[in-house]
Amino acid sequence: MTQYTPDYPAMIVPAGHVEPVPRRIRGYVAGRPVFDTVRARYLWLWPGYPQYCVPRDDIAEGALVDEGRSLTLKVGGARRQTLQMGSVTRPGAAWEWGEDAPAGVVGCVSFRWEAIDAWFEEDEQVFVHPRSPYTRVDALRSGRGVRVELDGTVLADAPSSVMVLETGLPTRYYLDRVYLDWTRMAPTDSVTSCPYKGTTSGYWSVRTDKAEYPDLAWTYDFPTRQVSPIAGLVAFYNEKVDLYLDGQPLPRPDPVSRANWEKEHR
């Protein structure tokens, strides 16, 4: 079997890499500020995206309680922390980096994303995880025809698309709905979110004459402004369908690491 060679840029940031965050970072729980800092650091625990590391002095007084438990994490040791804000108590919500952590984050605190109700970069809310400064996402209109097949069944045949090129992910081809065979599509209740594209407004399973395949296509009716050209268009997982670009078959990409990059940043 021929080994698949990715045709898109890979992530290049090694685990343990640290960089300054040139943005004001704030986090809220139950409407109260947990931290407010212009001195945060990015720390990469894996190449996909970084974590915020917040100086302890920029965290609300009394918000963290040391649990007396040490953690051995991928890039160093840390102390597990309980978050307390008013009547809200969240055990294991954070960890304070120890002396063997990468330089620049020792004594800083990282939070589990879901332990904070709302994250902000400057005055804009951030969802799912921090945006990597090394990730680029472009939405480009393309006049190259795109055909999508599965089990020999044509699911879509479009004369053009909007190509979304995102660092570390295969190119996605967003198609006008009029070029899809909707008799093969069934809506599902699935929802995923991405810090770069927004929250999906629809998912569809696909039925061929041979089988039914769950959650193969999705749309963003209200994407972020950076990828606004994809609004209302539909894309398929290249990894799970047969895709032709200008009549030429494209190899199926290998599944993206870390569970399809958290199912495209859920």
Image: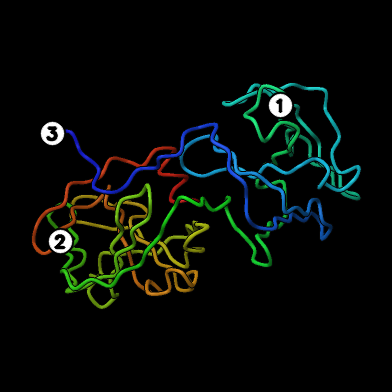
Percent position (x, y) of residue 21? Answer: 62, 50
Q: In percent of the image, x 90 and y 45: which residue is there?
A: 61
Residue 266, can we see it?
A: no
SS for dot 3: loop
Which residue is depicted at the point 53% across and 57% down?
195
Q: Earlier in the sequence, mark 2 or mark 3?
A: 3
Instruction: Please state if 166 lies on the left or on the right of 103 as rendered.
Output: left
Residue to which mark 3 is pinned: 2
Q: Earlier in the sequence, mark 1 or mark 2?
A: 1
Q: Nearer the viewer, residue 143 or 266?
A: 143
Near-viewer residue (123 or 215): 123
Q: Nearer the viewer, mark 1 or mark 2?
A: 1
Residue 78: which disc?
1
Left or right: 264 as drawn, with respect to 173: right
Q: Identify the residue at horizontal 68%, vertical 56% (top origin).
A: 119
The colour scheme used to paint the residues is rainbow
User: Can residue 8 be seen by looking at this rendering?
Assistant: yes
Residue drawn at (39%, 38%) of the image: 257
Three-letter amino acid code at the position of disc 1: Ala
Q: Label 2 to label 3, Cα distance in Å?
A: 20 Å
Image quadrant occupied by the N terminus:
top left
CB-based contact (under 8 Å), mark 2 and mark 3 = no
Which quadrant of the figure has residue 261?
Answer: top left
CB-based contact (under 8 Å), mark 1 and mark 2: no
Q: Amino acid at mark 2?
A: Leu
Q: Which mark is residue 245?
A: 2
Task: Identify the image quadrant of residue 102.
Answer: top right
Element class at badge 1: strand
Query: Given this view, does label 3 or label 1 mark the residue nearer the observer?
Result: 1
* Disc 3 residue type (three-letter): Thr
Badge 2 element: strand
